[in-house]
Image: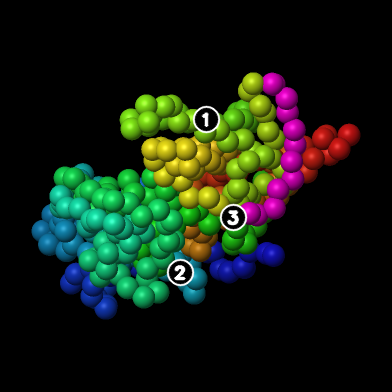
Amino acid sequence: MTNPVFDRSAPGVRITLLADEKAGSGEPLDLAGRIIGFTFEDAEKKADKVSLQLDNFDLALFDREDLLGGAVLEVSWGYPGNMSVPRRVVVKKLKGFSTLTVEGQALSALMNREAKTRSWENVTRSEVARQVAEEHGYEGQFIDIDDTEETLDVVNQTAETDARFMRRLAAREELEFYVDDGGFHFHERRQHAAPTHVFTWYADPGRGDVISINVESDLVRRAGRVSVRGRDPLQRTTVEASTTSASADRSTISEVIEVVDPETGSTSLQTRNATASVQPTSVTNASRAQRESEARFRRAERETVKLSLQVVGDPTLHAKSIVEVRGISSLLSGKYYVNDVKHVISSSGYVCELKLTRDGTGRRARAVAAA
């Protein structure tokens, strides 16, 4: 698998002004010669954010109504013949003077405007998520929701915006919630997908797309046993459950998971294939406690290795995807989950800054274990 080859000589930005968030098309926004810099932050756990730096030498931009808060813009960026998928954002801030900064957030920010109080009875969390998605106009292929198992007596939304409410429900099930160009998402992290890009690091700075790389995690630290405890008020008993790497079912990215048992101090190296995930919920009885402990273990294990990577700009890079990194030792090379991507276009060119995580190490650990 290789990354596509295209002309990188003239990166640029295309901006369209829309009448509203549901408009089919709009008019190009005239900012000829005024764009100094462009940044688009594609994040896993936050609303996507765009920032435009504009030259306001004649102060004329202060009279532009199309740059005021509340305007809906459609932005895309990249190279001639290879632009990103258009992203729609709502203008939230306008600041500066001779250099103006326009900041906008993804349309999911519209779900964070109005606090609501309401309740549902005898439903699953996925059923509630589906209803909220439909209320905001998402339907058919633009709804990607994993069914959850447990039917709850009541689900309350108390003085919360829909966005905060959905994040809270997703966290209870250890699912991901976000809204992007693909629609409304409420599902488990997709770690089993094939890599969308392959990056190779070379000692010669003139080769490859990788500009810089840094390991940000403690490579010695490993997730061991995770326990949760709760109280059953009816039976007046303590509910406890524990999860280790041997008992937790989950999909993994790395080839080798190192397990350290904090009670015995023993360590083992295990090769893992992708397996089904168990969806957790809050602790109220033994079965729920077990699901909760498994969720907490998976969450701790996911960030065993953290990398920050700066590469030559690529408009097809996006968060919540899988990439492969090669040439950084057998311990660190392999597949990674993309938590965040920042696309930066300036007078210096176009670069992407990535935050990557994975749940274990590579073949070197397996070789040590075999020895």
Tell me the CA gap for discs 2 and 3.
Answer: 35 Å
The outermost residue toward the right is: 371
Of pointers 2 and 1, the one earlier in the residue sequence: 2
The picture places residue 88, in percent across and down from the top left corner, at 30, 64
Compared to residue 49, the image places residue 76 above or below, namely below
Q: Which residues are magenta?
A: 264-275
On the question of residue 230 being in view, the answer is yes
Left or right of 21 on screen, residue 280: right
Give, as a three-letter code, the residue at label 3: Ala
Q: Residue 186 falls in which quadrant of the image?
A: bottom left
User: Split into 4 quadrants, where in the image is the C terminus?
Assistant: top right
Report helix, strand or loop for mark 3.
loop
Compared to residue 251, the image places residue 1 above or below, namely below
Tell me the CA gap for discs 1 and 3.
Answer: 21 Å
Residue 227: numbered disc:
1
Q: Which residue is mark 3?
A: 276
